[in-house]
Image: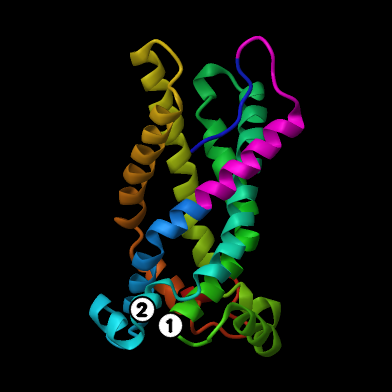
Amino acid sequence: MFMATGSGGSSPAAWRVVLANLLAGAVAGCAVEGALYPIDTIKTRLQAMIGGGGFKALIESGGGRGLYAGVWGNLAGVVPSSALFMSVYEPVKQMVYRRTGDEESFWGPVLAGVAAGAAASLTRVPTEVVKQRLQTREFAGAITALRTILAKEGVRGLYAGYGAFLLRDLPFDAIEFVAYEQFKQAAKRTLKRDPNAVEVSLIGALAGGFTGETRHMPQRPPPRRKRRAHPLGRKGACGFGFLS
């Protein structure tokens, strides 16, 4: 949740802000993947019903390394996706702020979150498709997976479940960043100063945890359908085909 913005009497050059947001997004994406990838692997295998799917079955079939199956290929997509998200979010938010009054300022993080999520989805979805096929042991490596999917299914195969992804993640992105901005403003009023880096990180974690619950409670079926669409993706599966 580190984002570069101008403060005080002088503002940094635009390219510095963009670069800072790119780097912040890339670092954050790597940190999240490194910490949560094993959990995501277990969930993917459970949803695809591969080898019983659970932690014990995964360890028995592939050892501890199975928890990180496909992680390097995934990081190759997560880094640009996260960097792109953060580099889009802040400029769009500031543009909306300039065009709205205080009573409508909540539209800043809403529209910025949706715009950033849509931009990042261009690389996030292919990364998810390849990652989940690696996690289910369909392919041995990311390069092999990418080549095979393109050869057999074309570019559309890399975007299997794209509609489900947008239905799930764009509302989540909007809600998360509205919560983040509101929590940050509340902290500023309480502390009577701008939150420091550690406090901003805690606020970001709180907003993410809060939004994560709202994300999965009403939307549990769509993530399951999306997970199945990715490993079993085929030509023509792009878009909203998961509803059929």
Q: Is residue 68 left or right of residue 10?
A: left
Question: Residue 206 in magenta?
Answer: no
Per the rendering, the mark at residue 136 is 1
Distance from disc 1 to disc 2, alpha carbons, whole Å, reads 6 Å
Element marked by disc 1 = loop
Image coords of residue 23 (percent x, y): 62, 43
Residue 10 in magenta stretch: yes
Using the rendered image of the protein, determine whether residue 244 is visible from the camera's viewpoint: no
**Residue closest to the eye, 196 or 110:** 196
Give amino acid for label 2.
Answer: Arg
- Horizontal side of 203 relative to 101 (left or right) equals left
197 up-or-down from 207: above or below: above
Q: Which mark is residue 45?
A: 2
Q: Is residue 222 left or right of residue 116?
A: left
Q: Name the residue: 44% across, 78% down.
A: 135
* Residues shaded magenta: 8-29
Secondary structure predominantly adopted by residues drawn in magenta: helix
Q: Residue at x 57, y 59 (%)?
A: 78
Q: Nearer the viewer, residue 219 or 122?
A: 122
Q: Which quadrant holds residue 205?
A: top left
